Image (cartoon, grey):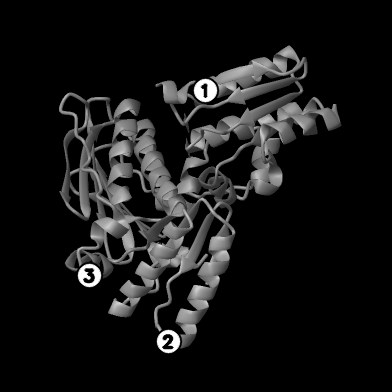
Amino acid sequence: MENNLITHTKISDTVLVVNPGKNLDNTNAHELVAVITKAQETGYKYIIIDMTPLEFISSAGVGAILGAIETSREAGGDIILCNVAEVIRHILEVLDLIDYLTIKDNLQEAGASCEVYK
Amino acid sequence: MLVDAGKIKVIKVPRVLSVETVDKFHEELGSLVNKQPTLVELDCSQIDLVTSSHINLLWEARTLCLENNLNVKLSFVSPGLIRVLKVLDLHDIFLGKQPEPKMDPLNDNMDNRVKDDRELKLEFRAETGAITRCLADFRLFLSRFNLPMKFVIELEIIFYEVATNIRLHSGLGTGDVIVFDAASHDDKITMIFTDRGKAFDPTLKGTEYEPGKAIREKKKRGFGLTMIFRMTDRIIYRRLEDSINVLTLEKNWRLHHGK
């Protein structure tokens, strides 16, 4: 179950980094939704999802991310994905999502993009 | 012949080996090695008739990669090529020794076994933990065939999404069993799910999906069938007379590799 542990780190008053663990599926997608929703309600404009260890994402995991994007954008922020592994990126490509998502190569670039738009 | 996939570099081994195709292969391999990728994938999908020249070429390519401290693997390895590698005692060198799936008699997976090198049968209860454990067994089974990672992740997702759909929508209780059979053929992987739940023909379901609209409407669910349809080449549903659902899904190696 540790593989599916969702953790998060505050970067600033407006930026939160969320780490979804190794698998993002039916066992923990609801938890990711809860973390993001709470962060949005608390006032975090930017939520960076650091996908470094992510190896598997199911439709529930995709839905957890997609369902939260518009709320952040409505608030003038965004949900930013970074460190997306090749296979995870492939899943996003299969779903034609690449053009609709904000994806950065690494955490540094993701953080910098939040500063730009802040 | 060269496909750039980030840190993984894929190079196709030519089907017909002439002076020109071999020279071109060496030239492309040399250029690829200079880029120092994490992994070099020797794509064998075009080899339909294995010759000693193919084996020599694979050996030379492997040697060059190892001399440059690069990881190398074969992909789209046909049963014919596996047989030749075994006869030449090169199987473990090129493909490595694959571990046997470990079956835990105390877990919920019942009567699970690899029927032979190319077939897998899993029986599991319609609950999340059992599906996750069987996904691990399926992953281990797939590791025998040296398939490209993108192909493997799609197969894993198909398994997970179909099993989860059955769990959520078939009306099965957590004590009811889902049977999963997988087989590797010359050019495809077939997966068959059998259960005694409510009749459900996914091929009759529309998969209306527009990514921008899904984001704007904050849609959190309903992507499973879209993923299954986009990752599968053929889906056949049958409802047998004694209330048994049989869902067969096929994924073709060669078809997808051209994309």
**Disc on res. B84:** 3
Residue B226 in the image: above or below residue A14: below
Q: Answer whether residue B49 is visible to the viewer in this image.
A: no
Q: Left or right of B89: which side holds A72?
A: right
Q: Is residue B129 visible to the viewer in this orientation of the structure? A: yes
Judge if badges 1 and 2 mark residues of a common chain.
no
Q: At label 3, which amino acid type do we have?
A: Val
Where residue A30 is drawn, which disc sits there? Answer: 1
On screen, residue B108 versus residue B208, left or right, reads left
Sort mark 3 into few (<14), some (14-19) or many (20+) by Cα contacts within 10 Å. some
Parent chain of label 3: B
Q: Chain of mark 1?
A: A
Q: Amino acid at mark 1?
A: His
Contact, mark 1 vs mark 3 (Cβ under 8 Å) = no
Residue B151 placed where, x, y %? 43, 54
CA separation in Å, label 1 and label 3? 49 Å
